[in-house]
Image (cartoon, rainbow, N blue to C red):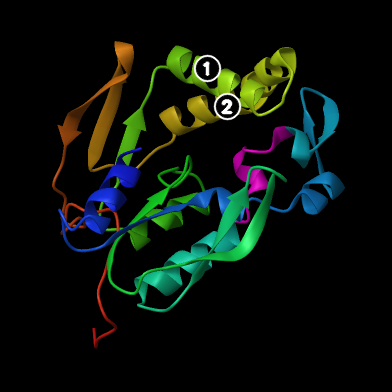
């Protein structure tokens, strides 16, 4: 969690300006909505809640609107995700008025209709590459620790997280930096690109509103 490190360094005064991490998990549709809508997977109908974590379970229009507002210098109350009740909490996170915002999420650099509009709101795109076998072990262990049965955690990974891995590997764009997770969970920067649309080495930089 590089963003957590950046936030702590900023709070300790070791780096400037301020840094805030904003995860996209809070933009999940509420469970009541996911339970009421269904999709067909492998010929079988299932509720959206069963595939929670796939792109269609997120409120993409609200995420786009929040990012556009931030980009324009507006004030936003960002939603959080409560892992005790497994539901989003609207407006739970006040966003700093100045500094660097690190927006985190699986699909922020996804090159598919609708999702591919998100990249324009950021100054820099960072993609974290993690071997699926490492991700699989971590995700299953975390879900099991949170109360899921082991077999249920494995089934959820195969249905949702494996799908997300394939999707984000095959359809990604706007990447300025790739950070690769190596065996032993060592991370290294394997590519760093400077593009005309990436003026700063920061995912999202805010300054006081001014004429543009």
Determine the secondary structure under disc 1.
Answer: helix
* Among the two numbered marks 1 and 2 on one chain, the one whose residue lies closer to the N terminus: 1
**Mark sitting on residue 136:** 1
Left or right of residue 1, residue 210 in this image? left
Foreground pick, 162 / 15: 15
Q: Quadrant of residue 148?
A: top right
Residue 6 spot, x, y in % from top left: 26, 48
Q: Quadrant of residue 142?
A: top right
The residue at which mark 2 appears reads as 161
Residue 43 spot, x, y in % from top left: 82, 24
Residue 182 spot, x, y in % from top left: 29, 16
- x 30%, y 40%: residue: 2
Foreground pick, 168 / 103: 103
Q: In the displayed image of the protein, which residue is found farthest to the bottom?
A: 211
Q: Is residue 69 magenta?
A: no
Foreground pick, 173 / 24: 24
Left or right of residue 146, residue 33 in this image? right
Dot 1: within a 10 Å radius of its alpha carbon, few (fewer than 14), some, or many (20 or more) residues? Answer: some
Total marks in image: 2
- x 70%, y 18%: residue: 155
Q: Which residues are magenta?
A: 51-59
Residue 174 seen = no
């Amino acid at each position: 969690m590089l963003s957590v490190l950046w936030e702590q360094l900023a709070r300790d005064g070791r780096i400037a300006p301020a840094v805030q991490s904003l995860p996209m998990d809070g933009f999940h549709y509420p469970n009541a909505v996911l339970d009421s809508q269904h999709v067909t997977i492998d010929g079988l109908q299932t509720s959206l809640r069963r595939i929670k974590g796939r792109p269609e379970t997120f409120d993409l229009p609200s995420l786009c609107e929040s990012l556009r507002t931030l980009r324009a210098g507006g004030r936003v109350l960002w939603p959080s995700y409560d892992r005790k009740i497994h539901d989003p909490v609207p407006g739970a996170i006040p966003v700093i008025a100045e500094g660097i915002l690190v927006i985190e999420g699986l699909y922020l650099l996804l090159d598919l209709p609708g999702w591919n509009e998100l990249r324009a709101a950021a100054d820099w795109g960072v993609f974290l590459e993690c071997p699926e076998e490492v991700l699989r072990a971590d995700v299953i262990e975390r879900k099991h620790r949170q109360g899921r049965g082991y077999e249920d955690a494995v089934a959820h990974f195969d249905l949702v997280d494996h799908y997300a891995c394939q999707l984000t590997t095959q359809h990604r764009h706007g990447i300025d930096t790739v950070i690769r997770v190596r065996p032993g969970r060592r991370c290294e920067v394997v590519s760093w690109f400077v593009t005309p649309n990436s003026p700063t080495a920061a995912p999202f930089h805010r300054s006081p509103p001014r004429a543009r």
